[in-house]
Every structure is written in structure tokens, then in C-alpha cells.
Image (spheres, rainbow, N blue to C red):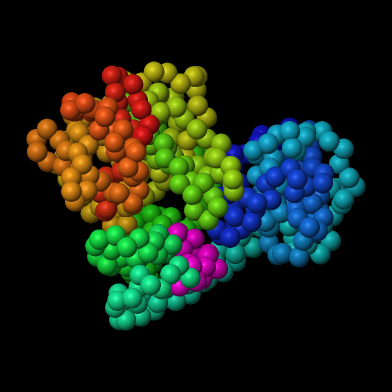
Amino acid sequence: MQQRWTAERVLALAPDAAARTAGSALARPESWSATGASTAAHGPIWGSGGGATAYRTVVDPAGPTGRCSCPRPGFPCVHALGLMLLWANDPAAVPVGASAPDWVDAPAAGRRGRAGPADPAAARRRAERRAAEVAEGTERLRRWLADRVHQGLAGTEREGYAMWDGIAERMVDAKAPGLAARLRAAGAIPASGAEGWPGRLLEDYAELWLLLRAHEHADDLDPSLVAGLRARIGWTVDAEDVLRAARAEGTAVHDRWLVLGSRDSVDGGLTERRIWLRGTGSGRPALVLAFGPQGRAPQLALPVGRTIEADAAFHDDAVPLRVALGERTGEPAAGAEPAGVGPEEATLAYAEALRREPWLEAWPVVLADVLAVPEPMGWRIAGADGFWLPVDRARTGEQALWRLSAMSGGTGLTVFGEYGARGFVPVTAWHEGQAVPL
């Protein structure tokens, strides 16, 4: 019997954000009239359905390869993604050993080579096509940004979301979903009407411009910077490939990892879960990303405040934070309250990380002995030494801040959160020795 994949591993196969969204919408039992999985260790999974037309889809996860009767070229099509997501998320919906129709074993006549072993030359051609599409998209966005700055910001708050959605969809079409997500986030700034929105919008413009210029000169950058740049633009890397390479090179980090915090966000119908870890032996921070299809939470959920034992393979970024997590050993165990630093030291650490990777989105910080303090100009996370961090209000709910303030009772707490260009986002606090997600 095939070992089931995780949803995030399936979603990593999707060529772009649109395919991820469409595939996620098909990951429901009612989308398929018949499904099944082979009992063989390297057998296929199959399904008939996938929408109004009953397409016939067969996937061999061992490749992964597959075929589908739909007219869409290339593997995986959205039907293959939907079937694999259903198989990953709902074992009962794709029963093992179900009687397979004759077409499951039939050759894929005229289906553009979807069946059979992977073709390295075809994979290379696909990669080259995507690189060309991304390059065309980034050039389009560069001209768009230049025009926006030349026109000025006056009246931007009255233009609505249509203008932002239009350029964001162009980036999705160009296989650059990371840029699309940044554009949608930027579009919410003028619409908010918040004080100081022009300055924040210009900051977003500047960050986008930095990414575009870096992409234009990627051949001149250090490979570790290019890895992070590609991730921000929207390239995905299969977690299994990262783990396999790290184990082969002996760079996987085996440790007992304290789960510092977990935070979900939704973009384009998909749920992204950011799980932050800290090695109790190595002291290294690590970020695990997990994704869930439309309307479903990611499969991976780790208990905040407890420890897990596992291998972690770090991506080749200039500031290595992202990891692929290997199989866990044993059960989660109680974790101690983590050691923290003051706001000043946290700011210096973030500045150093930002120097090494200019497009770093967030830096994990454990603050010790701090209070959440409401101020007329916004909330602050204040340390005993008088230094403080501003709170990123766009990503932090009012309820979480009042809860944090109430827990402290005027006494400093240990607080974990993400520190970024807009400020600090509290994620977890420790109260009376217990981790409390915010």
C-alpha cells in the first residue's frame, strides 16, 4: 500500500497558486463519483469525476506521474491535484483495494507522456518555461511599479481593490504567486484609511522593487540569497527532496524541538500554517510551513509549549529558518519555558538577520520579562530596561493584546512572536509556566 502524502507535499507539486486553489476545490468526496487506491506498495490511485465532466484520473505517487482524460497539458493537472489532496486528507474517501475499472491500467493514448518514468529533459523544459514566464511577469510588475510611483499616491485610497487584483492575477498567470500575495496585502493598505498609510504603501513598493531588482540580477547573487528570493517570488521545493538531500549530505539536525508557536493565515483560498520551533540542544530556530486545501486546516499540527524529537532539514537560505521536518520519534513531551532576550537585543538580532537576507519577512523572537502596554499611538511590547517594540497592528488582533496585558497583571511575561518591518506580532505567552497561544 502506498504511503500517504501530506497535503503540503501535494500542494508543492502545483505549478502556481491558481492550480493550488482549483485543485483544493476538487479535494472533496462529492467531486468524485468513484475513487480507489491500489494495495500494492507502488500502485496507483484513481478517480472518476473532478467536476461537471467525469474525467478519468490516475496518479502514481511513486513518480509522481499520472494521466488524466482532461484537455489540460502537463502533470499534475488540477484533477490530479484534487484527487491526491483527497487521498492525503480523507483516507476513507479513497478506499484501498477498491475494484479498479479497466481504464486504470489502460495506456494513456495521446496524453502527452503523463504515464511512465519521469523525463528529465521534459522537466528541464518545464523549468525553463516557468523561468521565462516569471521573468516576463517581473518585468511587467517593474513597469507597473514605476508608473505608480510616477503618478503619485493621491487618490490611491479611492481606486478600490480591482486595480490590485488585476496586477495580482497577472503575477499568478506568470507563475509568481508570492508576488501576487504581496500585491494583495499592499492593496489593503490604502483601503484601510489608517493614519500614515502612504508611508506604509511606499515601504511595500520599495520591498517589491528590491525583490524585482534582485531577480533581475540573480546570476550575480550568492546562491543562498537566490534560494530565499525564489521562495519569496513563489517557487516551491518538495519537503521530501530537502530531507533526502540533507540526510545524504549529513546536514539534517536531529534535536528535541520546543514548539514555540503556531499561526494560520489564508491567501487565495489556501490556509498557510507557520509553526516555529527551537532546538533544545542546538538552540536553532526553525520554521515549518504547512498548507491546507480550500476550506480545510493543514494536516500538520504540533502542540505549542511541548517538545518533539525529529530530524530537521534546513533550506539553503542566507538566513536558514525554513525546515522540512522528518518523521517524529516518540510522543510530545512537556517543554520548559524558553529563555528570552530584551527588546534591544531582539532588535539587534533582527537587524543582523536582515543584513544577511534583505527580503526576510519575519524573525522569530522570544522576549523575556515584557509587558503589553496600550498607548495613544498604538500598542507597545515594553521591556524592564525601558526599550520597547511596536506592535504590528495589521497582523495582531485587539483581543490578543488585551489578553496578553491581562495575563501579565503588571508583571513581566515571556512572549514569543514574529518581528518584522512593521513591528512585533505576539504569538504565544507563558503564564504560570504554561504556554498560552494568543
The range drawn in magenta is: 163-181
| Residue 90, image x, y percentages | 68, 36
Q: Quadrant of the N terminus?
A: top right
Query: Can residue 200 be spotted in the picture?
Result: no
Above-or-below relation of 91 to 55: above
The reply to whether the magenta stretch includes residue 174 is: yes
Q: What type of secondary structure mainly makes up the magenta span?
A: helix
Residue 253 is drawn in which quadrant? top left
- Quadrant position of residue 342: top left
Percent from the top left, x then y, of residue 120?
A: 62, 58
Q: Residue at x 35, y 48 (%)?
A: 395
In the image, 355: left or right of 82? left
- Give percent across and percent down for residue 28: 70, 45
Q: Give the percent coordinates (x, y) of residue 81.
A: 66, 51
Give residue 43's quadrant in the image: top right
Residue sitting at x 46%, y 63% = 180
Residue at 43 percent across and 55 percent down: it is 231
Task: State left or right for residue 261 relative to residue 202.
Answer: right
Q: Residue shown at 9%/35% (left/top)?
A: 385
Q: Is residue 90 above or below residue 49?
A: above
From the image, which quarter does the C terminus lie in?
A: top left
Of 415 and 121, nearer the camera is 415
